[in-house]
Amino acid sequence: MTAAEQAGPGRRALLHRTSLGALALTGASAIRLMVQFAMLPLLARLIGPSEYGMVALAMPFILLANVLSDGGMGYALGRQRDVTREQEATVFWLSGAIGFALMLFCIAAAWPMGAILNQPRLPWLIVALSPILLMNSLTTVANGRIIRGGRFSVFAAGDLISTFASAIAALAAALSGWGAWSLVAQQLVLWACKLVWVSQAGGTVVAWHYKFEEAKGLLAFGLHTIGAILADFVSRNLDSLIIGGVLGATLVGYYAMGYQIVRVPDQLISGPFYLYIFTAIARATHDAGARAVQDLAVAALRIGSAALAPLFCGLALTADLAVPLVLGDKWHGAITPLQHLAAAGFFFCMCSIMATTLMGHGKSGLRLRLSILLGVVVISSVAATVRFGLDIVSAAVALAMGAVACTYIHVLGRDLKMSRRRLVLAFWPAAIGSAAMAAVVVGARTLLAQAPVWLEFATMVALGGLAYLCVIWLIARRQLLADAKAFAHAQADKEGAEASKPVAA
């Protein structure tokens, strides 16, 4: 009898629903990013760097407050085995009150921030975006219910609905000449759709009950989660505020556009791939021993770097072709920052993989400290170099992220009691493949210097990608296949162990 058969119909149905939901969520993330990527050149041409930069200055305030808006209680509810209606009601009113208070705080702080950054239009943008905080906080209980039931397909459907609706709203507003307000409309429609869909699908029932003690434990768990998210937020957003305050809205628009592009690969894999690493490492930590955890840690870096390196390397090699072709000539100032930020994006993804490994190994506190370090180093590098211009700032961010990645490797090796050299050597397939890609692209570009931009770009993408794949196939295909099998084996062990547990009648 198989493990799935031993699990009983209820658990088989749950595993089936969760697996399909995870696949649906992965597909929805890919579609969402494709829509966003397709919208990027359209909105960039219709809005322009200055208007884009204005919203880039406003969004960090909203994103920072949005991290706090549910008190971190959504995931806390999701991991609970038994949750009473009274507890859900308490969480609903508590998170709603937090979201409403944060909304009022952002409105009150909008004008002082506009004065500090010398941007008189900024306060109105912050005020218009502030309802996002309340909308997000009101989804806390529904999110917890959906996570607890393993109904990830609900999130997938919500992502698709909100993405398409917000894209239509943004495009219609931009065509009507709304400028920066087109992006505001996009965000408001996005979160309104999420609120309606998740609340309906999660079956949120509003009850007139509130007792703080019922949510105290959930709030304590949530605060730890918030700490790590806040530290991560610092490294992703406050740099735009510093650049905008010193260099102005246009230059921060170039930087924000480049940063948004290099974050696409991380956004695509952050859900399914990081979750896959987390569950495999957690299972190996409990049952397979230290050696298995070490092997999986190396395999995660090898697979992740081999998959992501050609994207970032190719972007750096062809940015001068891609930017005018995709975004338009007025975005020419984003070329050099994008080339530098491509390296920063790769290092950030590697840090995320190592942070996920530490979380799976049960070291959430260590992950929090490393997240804080990452934020401090990146923001310090921006603050120290911003007066030298945007090109220097973006190069400093890339160097800072490289230094932080080295620190992550050192800490991960120490925690797993393994050689740092072994972790570093996990990058060798990606390094050799990237070198081959660079050699082919640089050589081919000299031959096609007089060709149309679109033809040169398409040729470089094809030749560079082919060169990378050929090298990886020749030097590392067996090792990468073995790495993939190791993760599959770890996941199968976990499923089998979970399925073989007795099910209460």
Image (tube, rainbow, N blue to C red):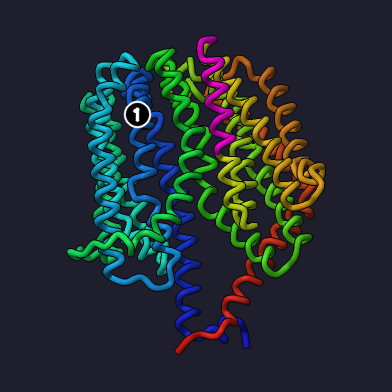
* Label 1: which secondary element: helix
For this view, does 131 lie left or right of residue 14?
Answer: left
Q: Give the range drawn in magenta.
A: 372-388
Say which residue label 1 marks: 43
Is residue 78 depicted above or below 265 in this figure?
below
Question: Quick one: 322 or 17, which is closer to the camera?
Answer: 17
Residue 486 seen: yes
Compared across the picture, whether 160 is left or right of 449 comes to: left
Identify the image quadrant of residue 278.
bottom right
| Nearer to the camera, 222 or 163 | 222
Task: Indicate whether 211 appears above or below 326.
Answer: below
Image quarter (top left, top right, bottom left or bottom right) of the C terminus: bottom left
Residue sitting at x 24%, y 44%? 100
Front-most of residues 438 and 20: 20
Q: Quadrant of the rendered structure where residue 368 is?
A: top right
Percent from the top left, x then y, of residue 318?
59, 25
The structure residue drawn at horizontal position 66% and vertical position 38%, both measured from the top left corner, is: 309
Residue located farthest toward the top when viewing the structure as drawn: 388
Q: Which amino acid lies under the numbered mark 1 shown in the image of this protein? A: Leu
Q: How many marks?
A: 1
Q: Is residue 377 magenta?
A: yes
| Place of residue 105 in the rendered image (x, y in percent of width and height, measured from the top left) | 26, 35
Is residue 263 found inside the magenta-colored segment of the image?
Answer: no
> Are there few (<14), some (14-19), or many (20+) residues within 10 Å of tag 1?
many
